[in-house]
Image: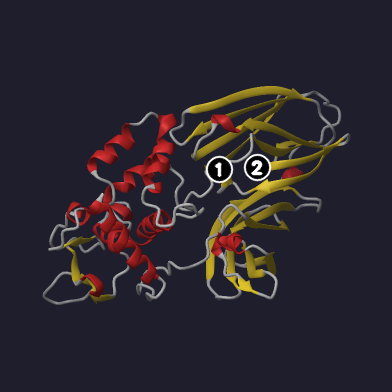
Amino acid sequence: MKALSVILLVMLIITQGLLAQEEMGRYRNEDVPEFYYDIINVASSETGKSRINLYFEIPYDELQFVRTDSSYIAKYELTVVVYDKDGEQVDGKIWEEAIEVTNYSLTNSRKNYSLTNTFFHLDPDDIRVSIGLMDLDTQKTGFRKTRLDLRDFSDQKFAVSDVTFTDQLEIDSLGIKSIHPQVADYIRATGSQLFCYFEIYSTDTKKNQAFDISYTLTDSKKHEVLKESYLRRRDSSRTMEYFAIDRSVLTHGRYTLEVDVKQGRREDKVKKAFILRWAGAPSTVSDLTLAIQQLRYIAKNSELKELMKAPEDEKLDNFKEFWQKRDPSPGTEKNELMNEYYRRIEYANENFSGFREGWISDMGMIYIIFGPPSDIERHPFEREYKPYEIWYYYHINRQFVFVDESGFGDYRLSNPYNWRNWQDGIYY
């Protein structure tokens, strides 16, 4: 326990100094607001067009709140730019959102979030979407990019839209009136049911056969979690439909939902991936088994083996308990050490991946354990030496030399480093 206290203390010191660090040269800036988004392709009301609905979710603690006389206010700006397959801009939108709360504790909440949306009517084609979110107080900006192949629903006699996940449905005698969407990349493990909403387009009025709907849910290991089927009558050329998944069959992790709809000889299928997270989970953790493996730099061998060998239905609770023991602010929603640890792993994966995943590379290991270096000395084009870098950590009086022996950017420590020595509080 004493060794763990040393780890905790030093990592917190490094974490506190993180905000003062400059960006690591060629590496991406790590201190940007995190947000989540979902893009849903549905039929458009405009002839010859295809519609995309975009939903954005920003946890409160990712934004800077400014105190006023009676409340705390955060403001952010969203920018969405749509490009065609040739890289030409075809549409875009910029708008601002504001959040106001009266309770200071909410400003650091990950359970509370701002949800906003927009939409575009576009030509059915292969498109690229670029998204930027700027905190208007700090001016820090996070970016996301993705590509989509938009379907031409108007050119099909039978088709199914993308699936939208929701925790709330408003229904009257005429059917579904409105939904409260959940972003597929960050579905919270709250409530007893997860609703899956989609639309069925069937333009042939002569065929008024019922729809044969089936759906299958698989986990990240492709194990079948759920499989159901039922019949649904056709309402009109656009039938709005949903079904509910019992959350008790789900635990933290990645899932894939496949919906198969048939009407006579016609059939269409759609797939939707999503991540279910428990409240307070780091935004970068989506695979529990992998998250446990990644504890290798901070957990003892005995702890790691115990976590890995635990029954599946106990792993999450054991994982939470592991981090609760190391929570620098117990009693609060946020575990700063856990969030920082997995943020570093994500950063390592984004910046140091090559022949191996970034988190198990030598540079990734040092970055995860010690954080960003105080200074970096780079030597990419030395005549008599292979490319190398020196990372300096002035606050612990250490330096690490990485050499690219292969010439392909695979930098390895010149002297192998045993992180177990760090666990035991030994410096040499």
Q: Position of residue 18 (x, y in %)?
A: 38, 70
User: Within the image, what quadrant is residue 210 found in?
Assistant: top right
Residue at 71% from the left image edge and 39% from the top image edge:
198
Q: Observer-nearest residue: 96 or 402? A: 96
Q: Which amino acid does label 1 sit on?
A: Phe
* Mark 2 and mark 1 residues within 8 Å of each other at the beta carbon: yes
Residue shown at the point (72%, 47%) measured from the top left: 180
Residue under circle 1?
Answer: 274
Q: Is residue 176 left or right of residue 37?
A: right
**Residue 10: x percent and y percent?**
29, 63
Q: Name the residue under label 2.
A: 165
Disc 2 residue type?
Answer: Phe
**What is the crowding at mark 2: few (fewer than 14 residues within 10 Å), some, or many (at least 20)?**
many
Q: Quadrant of residue 214?
A: top right
Q: Quarter-wise, where is residue 194 in the image?
A: top right
Judge by depth and name the residue closer to the eye, 258 or 172: 172
Number of residues whose C-alpha sits closer than 10 Å to that of mark 1, classed few (under 14), some (14–19) or many (20 or more): some
Judged left or right of residue 74, residue 425 is: left
Where 404 sits versus 207, above or below?
A: below
Horizontal side of residue 119 vs 293, given as left or right: right
CA gap, disc 2 to disc 1? 9 Å
Residue 414 or residue 19, whichever sits in front: 19
Q: Which of marks 2 and 1 is nearer the N terminus?
A: 2
Q: What element carries label 1?
A: strand
What residue sits 33% from the left and 37% below the top? 307
Q: Residue 144 carries which label?
A: none
Q: Is residue 71 above or below residue 313?
A: below
408 vs 292: above or below: below
Considering depth in this image, is 318 or 248 the residue closer to the camera? 318
Secondary structure under tag 2 reads strand
Q: Is residue 99 shown to the viewer in this render? A: yes
Q: Residue 152 in the image: state x and y as whole percent.
A: 71, 47
